[in-house]
Amino acid sequence: MESPIHSKRYFNDKMLGILIIVVAATLALVSPAYGYTDPGSGLLLWQMVGAAFVGSLFYLRRAFGWLKIRRKKRADES
């Protein structure tokens, strides 16, 4: 029989409690951030989002092509 201290449930509950304490402390100790972002920063963010979207489309196209070829090979073997 497994000890309650070493069980996964005990570990998950303990980690959740620690996470809640850390998040609460982070939100309670907020200080103002005096910073400046120029207009180019927003454009850079949009560029990264667009590049990630287009890159994921290329990846999905390749993955679906691989599945299509694999399915065709199985159909030919049968």
Image (cartoon, rainbow, N blue to C red):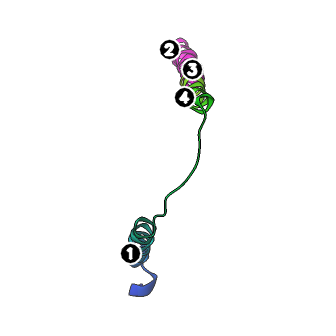
In the picture, the disc for residue 49 is 4
Sooner in the amino-acid sequence: mark 4 or mark 3? 4
- Disc 4 to disc 1, C-alpha distance: 34 Å
Q: Is residue 49 above or below residue 17?
A: above
**Which amino acid type is marked by label 3?**
Val
Q: Which residue is mark 1?
A: 17
Q: Is residue 13 above or below residue 35?
A: below
Q: Quadrant of residue 41?
A: top right
Q: State how far apart marks 2 and 3 are (Cα).
A: 32 Å
Is label 1 in contact with label 3 (beta carbons under 8 Å)? no
Q: Nearer the viewer, mark 2 or mark 4?
A: 4
Residue 59, horizontal then vertical, whole percent: 59, 24
Secondary structure predominantly adopted by residues drawn in magenta: helix
Query: In front: 31, or 13?
Result: 31
The circle drawn on residue 8 is none
Q: Kindly report which numbered mark, 2 or 3, lies closer to the viewer in this rendering.
A: 3
Label 2 secondary element: helix
The one nearer the camera, 22 or 8, is 22
Mark positioned earlier in the residue sequence (1 or 3): 1
Of the two numbered discs 2 and 1 on the same chain, state the one appearing first in sequence.
Answer: 1
Residue 20 makes an appearance in the image: yes
- Residue 65 falls inside the magenta stretch: yes
CA separation, marks 4 and 3?
9 Å
Secondary structure at badge 4 equals: helix
